[in-house]
């Protein structure tokens, strides 16, 4: 569940690469190609544990971002996630993720992606990904809530892979 949200953010960032102006924000270009993320999930009543992911992002002929991702979370089997995300006008992003209920929505600036969605297993997720000045790393912070109460936080660093 926690890594799923991380995957969502990576996909949405790459998906928003179609800005309509011919120039994509830097945060969106960051996710085209291969990225790897690692960090910590802090789950209420369970404590902290490591999380990792590896993603391959590309755009299709329509400009949508397609993301294939493998997510590893301590104590769970590795899982694959699939994304399809598009720019929906201005700085807005919408899309679908195979483990998300309904649409993924978000806003993008040149250096930040802010996403909102609800996982199929219940929690709502709010996520911020911020590109760092080096252009090769981004900080990811995700907050999971159930009935308005924070139940988990995930913090990771995402790196471009050459």
Image (spheres, rainbow, N blue to C red):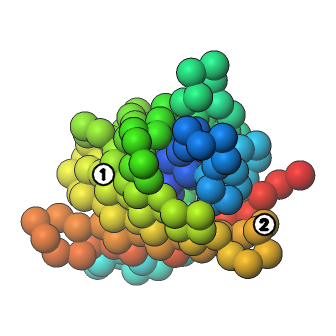
**Residue 75 in the image, given as x and y percentages of width and height:** 50, 59
Residue 75 circle label? none
The quadrant in which residue 145 appears is: bottom left
Q: Residues within 10 Å of mark 2 (few under 14, many from 20)?
A: some
The residue pinned by badge 2 equals 136
Q: Position of 117 compared to 51: left or right?
A: left
Is residue 95 among the parts visible in the rendering?
A: yes
Residue drawn at the location 39% of the way across and 74% of the way down: 153
| Between 117 and 147, the one nearer to me in the picture | 117
The residue pinned by badge 1 equals 117
**Residue 150 in the image, given as x and y percentages of width and height:** 24, 75
Residue drawn at the location 56% of the way across and 21% of the way down: 62
Residue 76, above or below 38: above
Residue drawn at the location 46% of the way across and 40% of the way down: 87
The quadrant in which residue 158 appears is: bottom right
**Residue 60 in the image, given as x and y percentages of width and height:** 63, 23
Helix, strand or loop at label 1? It is strand
The quadrant in which residue 103 appears is: top left
Residue drawn at the location 50% of the way across and 54% of the way down: 9
For the residues marked 1 and 2, what is the alpha-carbon distance in whole angstroms? Answer: 26 Å
Query: Count of labels shown?
Result: 2
Q: Position of 62 compared to 127: left or right?
A: right
């Amino acid at each position: 569940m926690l890594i799923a949200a991380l995957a969502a953010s990576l996909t949405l960032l790459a998906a928003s690469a179609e800005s309509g102006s011919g120039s994509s924000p830097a945060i969106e270009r960051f996710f085209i190609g291969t990225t790897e993320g690692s960090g910590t999930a802090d789950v209420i009543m369970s404590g902290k544990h490591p999380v990792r992911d590896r993603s391959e992002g590309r755009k299709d002929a329509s400009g949508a971002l397609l993301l294939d991702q493998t997510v590893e979370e301590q104590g769970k089997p590795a899982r694959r996630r699939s994304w399809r995300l598009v720019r929906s006008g201005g700085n807005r992003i919408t899309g679908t993720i195979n483990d998300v209920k309904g649409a993924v929505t978000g806003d993008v600036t040149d250096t930040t992606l802010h996403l909102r969605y609800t996982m199929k297993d219940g929690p709502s997720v709010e996520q911020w990904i911020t590109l760092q000045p080096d252009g090769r790393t981004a900080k990811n912070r995700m907050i999971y809530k159930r009935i308005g109460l924070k139940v988990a936080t995930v913090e990771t660093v995402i790196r471009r892979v050459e």
